Amino acid sequence: MKKFLALILALVMALSLVACGSESSGGSTAESAGGEGGGQKIGISMPTQSLERWNRDGSYLDEQFKSAGYETILTYSDNDTNRQVSDIQNMIADGVDLLVVAAIDGEALNTVMNEAGEAGIPVIAYDRLIMNDNVSYYVSFDNYTVGTLQGQYVVDTLDLDNAAGPFNIEFTAGDPADNNAGYFFQGAVDVLQPYIDSGKLNVVSGQTDFDTVATAAWDSQTAMERAQNVLASYYADGTQVDVWLCSNDSTALGVAQAIESDYAGFNQPIITGQDGDEANLKNLVDGKQSMTVYKAVANEAVVTLDLAIAILEGTTVDEAFIEAAGWGFDCAYDTESYATSEGHNCPSLLLVPDVVTTDNMVEKLVDTGYYTQDADGYLHPAN
Ligand code: BGC
């Protein structure tokens, strides 16, 4: 039932996204429509509208909470940390009963999180962990697994256990300010490191350090420019790049662009990604990207809503709560993996990411109702 609801919401949201304007702070305050919320107010702080997925998250969350009878304040902070701080401060001043925050910078919200704590407002860190002990719960996908899925895809596709190799590989990671980025990268590296150590994978640039391969703000242009530099410095003589391990779709987009414009070789490298952004699904169909790790953010919003209700009603949140929720999709209750400070673990509800390629794209994304498919094979968010 919840899954069905999420699908219906996905359709409604896709429609409302079309009407969605430019980056706006201050957002919308919706009147309570009755139901569980009873007029309580939820502050939803999203990082930016410039990266596709956060538009979906913001819309899903806003709609879920409204449908359940809550008032909402939804803001996008244009990837500007100061703006996110003041957006959240305004929500606190507005008397929100609970905050849902996807942080731009997990280390930079200390003051405002302390203010939320002093005001007795529970905080759900949404998708990205915030390094402050006032965070009550963390809802996300299993970030480390996202990386291992990308790494394992490379192992399987190149048949690294049997093929002679060596194969050339480069890495592009995410935003160091985003706590998730290190998990994605480490997951991939942990799978691939044995093959690097044995010489079957060769990082021609030698750039394997997270900070060196990171991409500020997950920006496509930034990822493209670094890839162009790497290609110019190490591959201009026609050296073949076999794999470009990208942590997500926005960075994969930049790398695919660099391959198209600046690569002297003739093969199409394996390029990984994450999110199932529309442009990247097009690249999958066009053979410019090999896979994406899909995360059903509609389900992430369902978990967040039910968790918020539990917090506001004082219901115990544990494994039994998750079992009783009957979500129809997997979600783990994890009290070990994430800490907001040394020794202070944050109870986490972690959903399961999934590999999408052209082979299973229709089954995973179209048959489930998340996307529609054109006659030319391209996918678009369902509407
Ligand atoms: C999210 C990814 C997303 C990235 C950039 C991460 O925190 O988990 O899904 O690709 O931010 O928006």
Image (tube, rainbow, N blue to C red):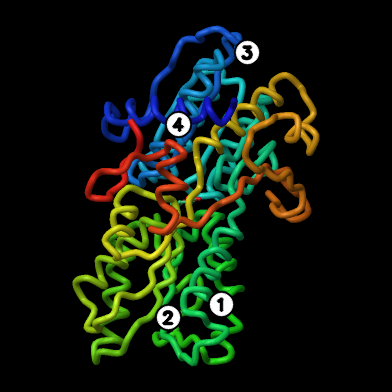
Cβ–Cβ under 8 Å for marks 2 and 1: yes
The crowding category of the residue bearing disc 2, from other C-alpha atoms within 10 Å (few below 14, some 14 to 19, many at least 20), is many
Image position of 293 (left or right of 305):
left
Among numbered discs 3 and 4, the one appearing first in the sequence: 3
Disc 3 is placed on an element classified as loop
Q: Distance between the residues labelled 4 and 2?
A: 41 Å
Please state which of residues 307 and 46 is positioned toward the viewer in this rendering.
307
Q: How far apart are marks 3 and 4 (CA)?
A: 26 Å
The crowding category of the residue bearing disc 4, from other C-alpha atoms within 10 Å (few below 14, some 14 to 19, many at least 20), is many
Mark 2 highlights which residue? 169
Mark 3 highlights which residue? 36
Indicate whether 64 appears above or below 296. above
Mark 4 highlights which residue? 87
Amino acid type of the residue that numbered disc 2 sits on in the rendered structure: Ile
Among numbered discs 2 and 3, the one appearing first in the sequence: 3
Cβ–Cβ under 8 Å for marks 1 and 3: no
Indicate whether 229 appears above or below 162. above
Residue 72 point in image, percent of width and height:
49, 20
Mark 1 highlights which residue? 192
Residue at (46% x, 88% y) in the render = 202
Disc 2 is placed on an element classified as strand
Q: How far apart are marks 2 and 1 (CA)?
A: 10 Å
Amino acid type of the residue that numbered disc 1 sits on in the rendered structure: Leu
Amino acid type of the residue that numbered disc 4 sits on in the rendered structure: Asp
The crowding category of the residue bearing disc 3, from other C-alpha atoms within 10 Å (few below 14, some 14 to 19, many at least 20), is some
Work out which quarter of the rendered image holds the C terminus and state it.
top left
Residue 194 point in image, percent of width and height:
61, 83
The crowding category of the residue bearing disc 1, from other C-alpha atoms within 10 Å (few below 14, some 14 to 19, many at least 20), is many
